[in-house]
Image (cartoon, helix red, strand yellow):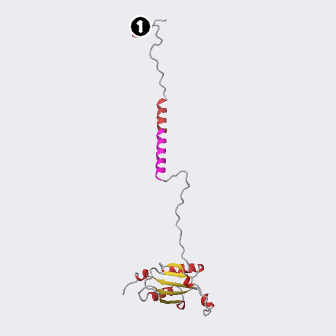
Amino acid sequence: MARSTFPRDRFDDLPADVGRVGAHRAERPRSRGWVVFLWAAVATVLLVIIGIFGVLVASGRISFGSDPEPAPTVSETTAVPIDTSYSVVVLNGTADAGLAGNLRDRIVELGWSGDSVQTGDSDTTDFATTTVYYRGPEDEQAARGLADAIGGAQIAQDGFLQPVDDPNTSDDESAEKRLVVVIGLDRAAAQPTP
């Protein structure tokens, strides 16, 4: 071995049978700092995306595995047209006098002729809810139109309006289209007291 010109130190006195001599380190690459920064940036962006996605799933804005629920739609309710070809009988089902006449006047204002709207008193004075009665399914729309026009009335089909097989009754009377309005206590409570 060639002699070196360096001064002698403790590493020169190592035994010859030891295989390791000195400490060897790899050269530090120049781009290693940028690689670590790039990996950290990618991991940060990935964690932010996962966090945002997780919040959207937790809040219910995104769902998996099921069809989305249809958004509620606002349907326009169209008013049922008033059919003035029906005759109307207004019966007062309360103890308050004058309700049938007041409702008759209102029905006439809605377009019925005065001759086709009659008034009277019901057999009872404690009828609960104002109701428009009709004869058959073909009369339901007319009853609904009248109930909507007078406001807050219910509709019901009832058998007492069915034509009776009576030889003394003319065919014109049994074929007459008729609605019966029974005024209930809900209207009596709403009436102003004089």
Q: Is 76 or 48 nearer to us in this picture?
A: 76
Give the left or right position of residue 43, taking residue 141 as reference: left
Q: Is 187 or 81 nearer to us in this picture?
A: 187
Q: Which residue is at the far front?
A: 166
Q: Is 73 or 21 nearer to us in this picture?
A: 73
- Which residue is the site of mark 1? 13
Task: Residue 113 in the image: state x and y as whole percent.
Answer: 54, 89
Q: Is residue 58 magenta?
A: yes
Give the left or right position of residue 149, taking residue 189 as reference: right
Count of numbered tags: 1
Task: Residue 120 in the image: state x and y as whole percent.
Answer: 48, 90
Task: Residue 21 in the image: state x and y as whole percent.
Answer: 46, 13
Q: Is 27 or 188 nearer to us in this picture?
A: 188
Q: Is residue 182 visible?
A: yes
Task: Residue 188 in the image: state x and y as whole percent.
Answer: 41, 83
Q: Residue at x 49, y 41 (%)?
A: 46
Q: Which residue is at the far left?
A: 194
The stretch in magenta equals 43-59
Main secondary structure type of the part rendered in magenta = helix
Q: Is residue 148 visible?
A: no
- Assign the C terminus to one quadrant of the image: bottom left
Give the left or right position of residue 148, taking residue 10 as reference: right
Q: Residue at x 44, y 87 (%)?
A: 99
Q: Amino acid at mark 1?
A: Asp
Q: Is residue 99 magenta?
A: no
Packing grade of label 1 (10 A; few <14, some 14-19, many >=20) is few
The secondary structure type at the circle numbered 1 is: helix
